[in-house]
Image (cartoon, grey):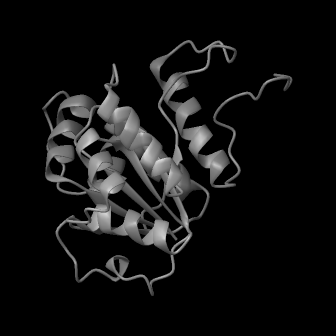
Amino acid sequence: MYIVGITGASGSIIGVRLIEELLRAGKEVTAIVTDTARNVISHELFRGEFSPASVAEVIERRGAGVSRELLAEEHNNNFFSPAASGSNRFDAVIIAPCSMKTLAAVASGYADTLMTRVVDIALKEKRQAILVPRETPLNRIHLENLLRAKDAGADIVPPMPAFYTNPETVDDIINFIVGKVLSLLNVEHSLFRKWGQDD
């Protein structure tokens, strides 16, 4: 089971696409979406014309063609969620996009939300934690927090596009980032052509 957190940083499509691809691969997913992220999703994905109440609504509205049977969603303040306990086994937690506020909480062990608690669990239980930080340019505090998170065991995947894949659309760029996360999770995908791979 994979836990995907979506914060209020720009780039919510990365988290949404990751959830879609994990579901497409037949993986169980628990989504944790902040209140600010819901507003960002409405603005960035639907130009403010649709305000989804859940990730399931987002996926349905996008017409992704994936089953939502394996999708659960938890409120970010629900510390009674099974995900809040270290005894709950999950494969990995991915925060995509990860705001600098959430990064700061993770780097300092300040688990004041369900999302940061789950990352804290992953780090202490030696499970996989992946952060997709979304900010630019980065100041020294951001860089030091990224290093602290990495030193604690998190994988850091900045959403930096590759150009050897010859991206033609924004979707191509997003697919590359999501594909890099899936590769770290050892989940098979065909979101981009790997270097040296024939068309």
The image quadrant that residue 12 belongs to is top left
Q: Residue at x 31, y 25 (%)?
A: 139
Report whether 27 appears left or right of 48: right
The image quadrant that residue 128 belongs to is bottom right
Report whether 155 appears left or right of 87: right
Is residue 17 placed above or below 194 in the rendered structure? below
Is residue 68 placed above or below 194 in the rendered structure? below
Q: Position of residue 132 (x, y in %)?
A: 44, 41
Q: Which of the two residues, 36 or 43, is positioned nearer the viewer here? A: 36
Question: Which quarter of the image is occupied by the C terminus?
Answer: top right
Is residue 150 placed above or below 89 in the rendered structure? above
Q: Position of residue 179 (x, y in %)?
A: 60, 39
Residue 72 can be seen in this image: no
Q: Position of residue 186 (x, y in %)?
A: 69, 55
Q: Residue at x 14, y 41 (%)?
A: 39
Q: Position of residue 133 (x, y in %)?
A: 39, 37
Q: Residue at x 19, y 49 (%)?
A: 52
Q: Which of the two residues, 126 or 94, is positioned nearer the viewer here? A: 126
Residue 169 can be seen in this image: yes
The image quadrant that residue 86 belongs to is bottom left
